[in-house]
Amino acid sequence: MDRALYGPGGFYRRELPRHHFSTSAQTPVFAEAVARLADAVDAGLGRPEAFEVVDVGAGNGELIGHLDSLLDERARLTAVELRPKPGDLPERVNWQSHLPDRVVGLVVACELLDNVPCDVAVVDPEGGLRYEEVDEHGETRPGGPVDDADAKWLDEWWPLPEPGRRAEIGRPRERMWEALTGRVASGTALAIDYGHTRADRPEAGSMSGFRGGGTVRPVPDGSCDITAHVAVDALGSDRLVTQREALRDLGLPVERPPLSLAYRDPTRYAVDLARASASARLTDPGGLGAHWWILSSPVA
């Protein structure tokens, strides 16, 4: 999975996410909500002289580009991404391939954790826990026994009671989350992803592939995105809410503007209608609205 996504010729080395799937981060209205959260974090820190917003796994820079027009010049904008900086991004956006050592402000990782490579565990016919192996054609088979650390994680967070059950082992996602929160000297870390909790783990796991706007087999040859839902309750956080709840709390406009506005101010009506439509998509409980917001605010 790591090689297929991030190695030489890997999917994220040569493909733009927007060509294959849609994310919240590509939507200007979503950036408005993140900007409101950034302002709240900034205010909570007492408006420090240096305030930074870091977008980890920035893709083509859509979110950080929108934030440039929403946050004042005091905000330092940093994007963390393996690909080169797109030429249309503002000059003030600092583009780098590694996490900053220390952040005072807001760290955002939108649909990053689901692409953190992880092992899959399966239960063999004898009831033993084994890693699942996969070849370059996507064919799978049971491999060696799961080691003690992974077995302990499974026992605590995702027990597999019978043969045929499958689980994605979440320890690598936890390490990434710890890396993100560990960089926050003061402020907030936010991860946004689709996932599950102990009450609704998928019985057969969730690993899948995406290419060209559709679901495909997760063949690890670099031809497609490979993703797996995140066991969000295992990460550890100060707040865990659905995106629908989070965006409503941030005051995202979801009501359609009154039709009378179309007669008084057609341009404003069109703009407000487009924003409300985008907000409705972001808060759809059957879609992006079901994504999880995982927030942690380390004490300075």
Image (cartoon, helix red, strand yellow):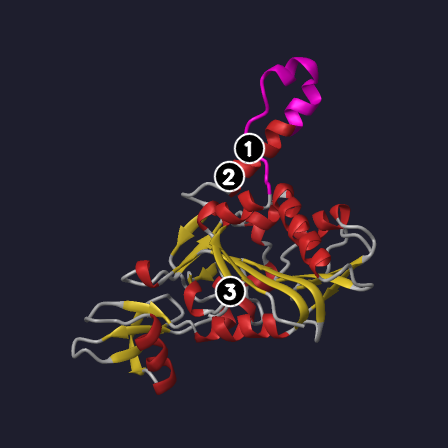
How crowded pointer 1 is (Cα within 10 Å; few <14, some 14-19, many 20+) is rated as some
Query: Residue 117 location in percent, x, y?
Result: 47, 70
Could you tell me how far apart the alpha carbons at marks 3 and 1 are, in whole angstroms?
27 Å
Relative height, residue 93 to residue 158 (above, below): above
**Contact, mark 2 vs mark 3 (Cβ under 8 Å):** no
Label 2, on which residue?
281
Q: Is residue 237 magenta?
A: no
Q: Amino acid at mark 1?
A: Ser
Mark closer to the chain start, 3 or 1: 3
Residue 11's image quarter? bottom right
- Residue found at x 53% / y 47%: 22
Dot 3 amino acid type:
Leu
Question: Who is closer to the viewer here, 166 or 105?
Answer: 105
- Residues shaded magenta: 251-271
Kind of residue at disc 2: Arg
Residue 259 part of the magenta-drawn span: yes
- Which residue is pictured at 61% across the width and 31% down the height? 274
Is residue 126 depicted above or below 243 in this figure? below
Q: Secondary structure at mark 3?
A: helix
Q: Which numbered dot is residue 113? A: 3
Left/right of residue 111 with respect to residue 134 in the rendered view? right
Residue at 61%, 62% (x, y): give it. Answer: 57
The CA span between labels 2 and 3 is: 22 Å
CB contact under 8 Å: marks 1 and 2: yes
Q: Determine whether, in the image, residue 28 is placed left or right of residue 195.
A: right
The C terminus - image quarter: bottom right
Q: Which residue is mark 1?
A: 277
Residue 196 vs residue 210, the one in the foreground: 196
